[in-house]
């Protein structure tokens, strides 16, 4: 152990007395490690952000849809199917189709384009943002086709200048047919930028699907509906049970006619894209580390040649082959470890800069930092083996005679 | 009890084959403990080869070398390293200090390879430097010292771990006459303190300070003379 500290001291001293050379040698390692840290930290940041977004948007959601391309008798879902899911599948908050239609409305504040989103009473849970005033429409409202609607806070402010609008009426115009709706609830604005992007900045209104009849737009068969579960952890079970239930009800067991997509699938997709990007950058970084490692090997060979006499002195004083080997290996490892640490610092700074520019926070994980440090010293040890062996194998007489 | 150094019928042949060089040709040398021996010869006489052999830096082509009763001639590199560390203190013509280390750190080197703990190492190094009168320059680097001082550091390094043999290869070859006297005085003192000193030189005046002179020529021992009388001069 005392020998090891000795080597550490010697190595640091040699690096210090050859500052410029050591830095240039480290450069390849610095570039490699910093790009890995940068991309992994930014990737983790993106992952966390997207996870959060998707969770907020569709946490625990499962979409069930039909593929009728190979069926002679197409399969469509009906209200009875939704009720069957509610009754037979556990941990389900609500089941609803989602049907969107464009409308316009005119208030004292002007004329606005509106995206009307319609479904069953189960749509209350389709968005995770809570109702802050009034209530969502009930099964009774749905069955009787009452013309009621729920609007978000921001829409209320735009349309009326206030959020205290429960009980007021809103006149919605769909393809030239005009109907009056009572506003019965206010939903909190979504914090998710993806959802706000999805509505294209339009005002949104939620209403029972049955009101569409009044516009001459009767919908009873659906190719797709959503099941909102109590949480993400139930999503895959809900998906499985719902598919077999639908297959039983429509008598299409097996054929791939009824399909599901859950939030987890969407997440897996995002993660796999990030995975590809990470793999690519890691490949580039690996090449940079390889080149950097060869640089380290080169400089270590120079160092061994320059210090031939020192090696001879050490050997004559009783240094074993392994002592000399260890001395040069630790020097190579320290060069690359220092490069790695500088790379980690630069990578973390770069990740913070990139992420703050995009608008979310980078995640530098301890495991990444430890991994990068270990890996960079491993590069040094690997590429240091050849020069160190050359030093260790020198004959003390030849080494002492070296001028 | 056997002799400290016992070289039996040793040959060293370089480039075996057509252009072979017989650097040592059936050499026998025995050195007892606490002798002060000078090995003298011209360059090319084989004295450097003999010194490498005695210093366990090299192994003979044939013959045997017993050091402290131990057969050294067939040892591996690492075993030779251990023997050098334990048995021999080297003093070289070119001082051979490591330029980036201070005097104290240079003296500590053989102790590090002997796995002596840090505190004891520092103490032994300081004692050795005191013996050569350099305790005031402990933290200076070799480049900040005169040739004589550097050689004294090298002597301190050689005696720090109290090896039985001090092997000095032309220790005064790079020094002026004043420093030469100083260094020879130290070597003589070491001998008086009980060390076995082997001095390799080409200089008759230097060799004359030893109590025994072995003259080597063309790889053979030409003359081996004891001069006990000089000891108390």
Image: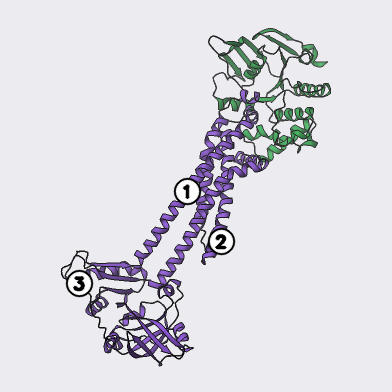
Chain colours: A purple, B green
Res B35 visible: no
Is A16 located above or below residue B225 in the figure?
Answer: below
Find the distance from the CA under tag 2 to the CA under tag 1: 21 Å
Query: Looking at the image, is B183 positioned above or below residue A245?
Result: above
The image quadrant where one finds the C terminus of chain A is top right
Q: CA distance from mark 1 to mark 3?
A: 49 Å
Res B197 → quadrant: top right
Query: In the figure, residue A81 lies in which quadrant?
Result: bottom left
Choose the circle earlier in sequence order: 2 or 3: 3
| Residue shown at the point (45%, 83%) measured from the top left | A153
Q: Quadrant of residue A297?
A: top right
Q: Which residue is mark 1?
A: A284
Tag 1 secondary structure: helix
Give the CA distance from mark 2 to mark 3.
52 Å
User: Is residue A393 left or right of B158 when viewed as pictured?
Assistant: left
Few, some or many residues within 10 Å of mark 1 (<14, 14–19, 20+): some
Residue that numbered label 2 is attached to? A353
Q: Circle 1 marks a residue in which chain?
A: A
Left or right: A103, with B48 as reference point: left
Q: Are marks 1 and 3 in contact (CB under 8 Å)?
A: no
Upstream in sequence: badge 2 or badge 1 = 1
Q: Quadrant of the N terminus of chain A?
A: top right
Q: Position of residue A267 (x, y in %)?
A: 38, 64
> Are the residues flagged by discs 2 and 1 in contact, CB closer than 8 Å?
no
Nearest the viewer among A38 and B77 is A38
- Give me the chain letter of mark 2: A
The residue at which mark 3 appears reads as A75
Q: Please tell me whether residue A37 is drawn above or below residue A297 in the rendered image.
A: below
Within-10-Å neighbours for mark 3: few <14, some 14–19, many 20+ = many
Q: Residue B40: give x, y in percent of width and height.
A: 72, 13
Query: How far across and down, in percent of the image, does residue A191 sit?
Result: 46, 75
Q: Secondary structure at mark 3?
A: loop
């Amino acid at each position: 152990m005392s020998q090891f500290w000795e080597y550490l001291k010697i190595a640091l001293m040699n690096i210090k007395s050859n500052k410029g050379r050591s830095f240039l040698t480290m450069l390849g390692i610095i570039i490699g490690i910093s790009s890995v840290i940068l991309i992994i930290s930014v990737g983790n940041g993106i992952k966390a952000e997207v996870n959060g977004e998707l969770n907020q948007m569709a946490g625990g959601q499962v979409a069930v849809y039909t593929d009728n391309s190979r069926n002679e008798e197409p399969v469509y879902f009906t209200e009875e199917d939704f009720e069957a899911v509610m009754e037979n599948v556990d941990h389900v908050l609500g089941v609803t189709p989602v049907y969107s239609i464009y409308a316009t409305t005119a208030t004292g504040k002007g004329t606005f384009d509106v995206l009307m989103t319609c479904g069953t009473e189960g749509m209350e849970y389709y968005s995770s943002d809570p109702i802050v005033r009034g209530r969502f429409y009930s099964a009774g409202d749905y069955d009787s086709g009452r013309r009621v609607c729920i609007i978000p806070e921001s829409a209320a402010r735009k349309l009326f200048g206030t959020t205290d609008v429960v009980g007021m009426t809103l006149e919605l115009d769909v393809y030239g047919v005009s109907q009056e709706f009572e506003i019965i609830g206010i939903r909190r604005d979504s914090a998710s930028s993806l959802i706000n992007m999805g509505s294209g900045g339009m005002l949104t209104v939620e209403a029972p699907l049955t009101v569409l009849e009044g516009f001459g737009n009767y919908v009873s068969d659906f190719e797709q509906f959503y099941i909102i579960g109590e949480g993400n952890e139930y999503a895959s079970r809900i998906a499985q049970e719902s598919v077999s239930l639908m297959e039983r009800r429509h008598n299409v067991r097996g054929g791939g006619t009824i399909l599901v997509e859950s939030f987890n699938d969407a997440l897996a997709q995002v993660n796999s894209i990030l995975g590809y990007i990470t793999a690519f950058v890691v490949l580039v970084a690996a090449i940079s580390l390889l080149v950097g490692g060869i640089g380290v090997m080169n400089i270590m060979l120079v160092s061994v040649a320059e210090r031939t006499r020192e090696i001879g002195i050490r050997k004559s004083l009783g240094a074993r082959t392994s002592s000399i080997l260890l001395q040069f290996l630790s020097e190579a490892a320290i060069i690359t470890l220092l490069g790695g640490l500088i790379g980690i610092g630069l990578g973390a700074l770069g990740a913070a800069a990139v992420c703050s520019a995009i608008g979310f926070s980078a995640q530098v994980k301890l495991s990444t930092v430890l991994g990068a440090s270990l890996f960079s010293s491993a590069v040094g040890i690997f590429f240091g083996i050849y020069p160190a062996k050359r030093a260790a194998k020198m004959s003390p007489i030849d080494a002492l005679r070296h001028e | 009890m056997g002799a400290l150094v016992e070289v039996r019928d040793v040959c060293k042949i370089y480039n075996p084959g057509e252009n072979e060089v017989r650097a040592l040709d059936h050499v026998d040398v025995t050195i007892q403990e606490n002798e002060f021996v000078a090995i003298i010869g011209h360059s090319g006489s084989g004295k450097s080869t003999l010194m490498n052999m005695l210093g366990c830096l090299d192994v003979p082509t044939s013959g045997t070398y017993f050091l402290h009763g131990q057969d050294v001639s067939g040892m591996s590199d690492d075993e030779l390293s251990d023997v050098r560390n334990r048995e021999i203190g080297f003093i070289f013509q070119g001082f051979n200090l490591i330029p980036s280390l201070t005097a104290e750190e240079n003296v500590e080197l053989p102790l590090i390879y002997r796995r002596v703990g840090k505190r004891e190492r520092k103490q032994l190094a300081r004692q050795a430097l005191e013996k050569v009168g350099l305790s005031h320059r402990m933290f200076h680097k070799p480049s900040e010292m005169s040739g004589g001082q550097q050689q004294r550091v090298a002597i301190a390094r050689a005696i720090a771990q109290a090896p039985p043999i001090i092997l000095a290869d032309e220790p005064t070859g790079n020094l002026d006459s004043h420093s030469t006297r100083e260094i020879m005085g130290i070597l003589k003192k070491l001998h008086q303190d009980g060390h076995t000193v082997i001095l390799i030189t080409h200089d008759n005046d230097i060799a004359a300070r030893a109590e025994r002179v072995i003259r080597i020529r063309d790889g053979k021992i030409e003359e081996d003379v004891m001069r006990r009388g000089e000891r108390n001069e």
